[in-house]
Amino acid sequence: MTPDRPALHTLRVRREFLAVAKGDKKVRRGLVLQARARQPDTNDAAIRFGLTATKKIGNAVIRNRTRRRLRVLAREILSAHGQPGYDYVLIGRAATKHRTWDSLRTDLRSALTQLHGRRNKEE
């Protein structure tokens, strides 16, 4: 992490995941991105993210591999393109294990662009 980028923190509590689920959702072939702005009264400018991989995508080995790929992807892309004060949840899909790394990066970048681009137009 460089000084000009906000800190990345991990979501760990179920209620935080449920709160993000009430926000916007963008579906891509390799992943699903859920995002929600935190309350404006919090002075925390960090970006928080969580990871989810359900049993529908495969056994424990596949779920763990999916989460590892998404964790590295989040640290790379969210630190550069995520907005401070937002919580993000990356949900692995069955196609996550087969997607190339460049395709996953494109999926997350396009979801973030659509999410924040639309929000900026509304304001």
Image: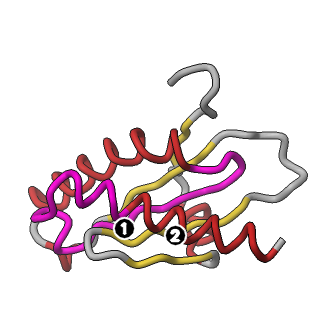
Crowding at mark 1 (Cα within 10 Å: few <14, some 14-19, many 20+):
many
Q: Nearer the viewer, residue 24 or 63?
A: 24
Residue 71: horizontal and vertical position, in percent?
34, 46
Crowding at mark 2 (Cα within 10 Å: few <14, some 14-19, many 20+):
many
**As shown in the figure, which amino acid type bears the numbered disc 1?**
Ile
Residue 41: horizontal and vertical position, in percent?
90, 52
Asked if residue 14 lies left or right of residue 39, the reply is left
Residue 5, above or below 17 = above
Q: Which contiguous range is marked in magenta?
A: 82-107
- SS assignment at label 2: strand
User: So how many labels did they put on this image?
Assistant: 2
First in residue order: circle 2 vs circle 1: 2
Rendered image quadrant of residue 19: bottom right
Give the Cα separation between the discs numbered 2 and 1. 8 Å
Residue 13, above or below 115 = above
Q: Which residue is mark 2?
A: 34
**As shown in the figure, which amino acid type bears the numbered disc 2?**
Gln
Residue 9: horizontal and vertical position, in percent?
55, 39
Q: Is residue 36 magenta?
A: no
Q: Which residue is mark 1?
A: 91
